[in-house]
Image (spheres, rainbow, N blue to C red):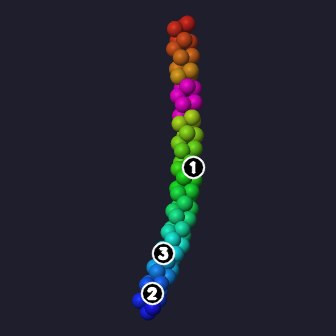
């Protein structure tokens, strides 16, 4: 009988340890998820900023190209 009680106590202790591990893993997953969201948000911000800068450069290049074309066209007409 004492052997059975000891076995049951060991099982209960093991279940308690596993429950603690599960709670700890749940907390770690939550922290990981929060970190991922923060990183994802930063990546979105940087991507947006890069896209805005690329658009600015593209527009400036188009304007310079147009100005150059008009200048060459004007010179050739003279």
The label shown at residue 18 is 3
> Which tag is nearer the camera, tag 1 or tag 2?
2
The residue drawn where x is 58% and y is 40% is 52
Residue 26 occupies quadrant: bottom right
Q: Earlier in the sequence, mark 1 or mark 2?
A: 2
Give the Cα separation between the discs numbered 1 and 2.
Answer: 61 Å
Q: Earlier in the sequence, mark 3 or mark 1?
A: 3
- Residue 77, above or below 64: above
Considering the image in quadrants, where does the N terminus appear? bottom left
- Residue 33, above or below 3: above
The span shown in magenta is 57-64
SS type, badge 1: helix
Relative depth, front residue between 70 and 54: 54
Residue 33: x and y in percent read 55, 60
> Which tag is nearer the camera, tag 3 or tag 1?
3
The label shown at residue 4 is 2
Q: Are marks 1 and 2 in contact (CB under 8 Å)?
A: no
The residue drawn where x is 54% and y is 70% is 27
The label shown at residue 28 is none
Task: Farthest residue to the bottom: give it.
Answer: 2
Residue 53: x and y in percent read 55, 40
């Amino acid at each position: 009988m004492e052997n059975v009680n000891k076995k049951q106590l060991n099982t209960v202790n093991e279940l308690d340890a596993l429950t603690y591990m599960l709670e700890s893993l749940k907390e770690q997953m939550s922290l990981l998820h929060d970190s991922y969201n923060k990183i994802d948000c930063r990546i979105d911000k940087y991507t947006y900023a890069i896209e805005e800068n690329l658009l600015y450069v593209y527009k400036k290049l188009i304007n310079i190209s147009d100005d150059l074309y008009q200048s060459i066209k004007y010179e050739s007409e003279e």
